Image: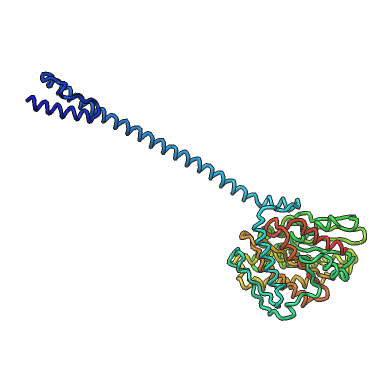
Amino acid sequence: MAVTNKSYILHCTLKVAKGSLIFVPIENFEAKEISSTFSHCKQMMAQQQENIKQRKRNNERIRNAGSSLTTTKKKIIAIFLYMIMSWVWVTIIDSSKHEDDRVSSQIKSGHSVTNREAEMERQVAQRKLDYRKTYGNGNGSNVIDDSSSEDVTNIGDKVEWRESKNTEEQSHHQYYCDVGFKPNNECFDILSPHLKFKKAWHFMGDSQMGYTFKEIISTYPYRKISGRTAPDERCGFLEYCYLEKRREWDVQGARLTQGPVLYGLSNHFCSDLSGFQNTMVEGDKNNFIEYLAIEFASDVEQQTPTTNTTQQSASLYLRNQLHHYDLTIDDRVCVVNVGLHDQNICAVPAWLRKEQCGDLYMRNVETYLKELDSVCGYIVWISTTSCMNSRRHAQRNGRSVDWNRFVESLLNRLYPEKSFFVDVWGKSSNTTHLDNIHLEASYYEELASLFTSLM
């Protein structure tokens, strides 16, 4: 019994020792103490097991607390990052929302946009390439490959003309001059023998012509004795021209083959063009300058009881004006451009098939020129300017280059002695754009100086 107990006590003592509580050498116990030592050992073992369990529970609580703390930190960090990203996104959206307003303000103040320099360099390089392919490749070809330009709709940039491009059409107009790569004196030398000191100068076009006209007013070489403007920016065209409105506005080919496309379509007798209105300034030498807001080659915005289109209404007004000012046709110069707004007609496939776009512009321009021929002694056509090829807008550089080439050929064929073609493609391509189509003030100032030097 003693041996068994002694052996058990020894074993128990060793287990206690392994449990790191206490080690009691067996030789220190007397035989009579073995029984009490056995009971004590059992108590010590039970306490040790309880202590071990408690430590495990404590460790588990610590681990759980640490895990909970880590999860909370992660949640806090995630929420913080989400708030930062949301703020950045809202800022970007807000900046994009006000971009057009900012650009419009910069146009009015004459300041240029200094950012997007890399994008501008790319666009300028592309426009130069377009220009060289049409006018400067030296092999007589004027085929435009603008497959690298961005597409805005299913309407492509390439325009396949029905007319053949023969040798005559490929050559420049006999009264062609380039504002883009040569000084203005080249244009002055070509225009001056025919147009110098003409009494009546009429500038007809969209906002590009409107900005040029504003610069002409500021540098007009005569004393201004009177002037007038349309009573309403967009809807005062006919009243300015002393013409009666048709009883009921007729939509005719609007949105399909003619303008208007946007504002004028739902606001009858009003213009798609905003920011400009008919304006006249009279000088002290029985002379005057005038701007007429005509943004399409053909549109039905301004209709009278006897005219169906704005172009016909403008022709009627100019005819009446000859008698009022006691002028002859030879006293009048009409400076004209259309093309940027006409591309809006081509922008939606449901309105016009791709292959019809170029043919439509040809027909509309030819009809417009016939109206001008009856009331204008001389026609100066300003080429359509380059654009930024923005995806948000319909204007495409490849299409504009083709259309410019066509108009030059048309003038050379139909009105070789009374028409002039002023090419501003190079100038606009090397001028900073303020938005998709508008340019910094230096472009309009240089073009205006050409005309004021002829007045």
Q: Nearer the viewer, residue 333 or 227?
A: 333
Quarter where residue 154 is shown: bottom right
The quarter holding residue 431 reads: bottom right
Q: Position of residue 151 (x, y in %)?
A: 60, 64
Q: Position of residue 415 (x, y in %)?
A: 80, 75
Which residue occupies the foreground of this view, 182 or 173?
A: 182
Tell me, yes or no, if residue 134 can be seen here. yes
User: Does 415 sit above or below residue 105?
Assistant: below
Task: Locate the C terminus by quadrant.
Answer: bottom right
Can you give x and y, in whole percent of width and height, for residue 176 in the image? 79, 72
Residue 4 falls left or right of residue 140: left
For this rendering, which residue is in front, 4 or 59?
4
Viewer-proximal residue among 110 and 32:
32
Residue 343 percent location from the top left of the image: 66, 65
Tell me the quarter of the image containing the N terminus.
top left
| Residue 336 in sight from this viewpoint | no
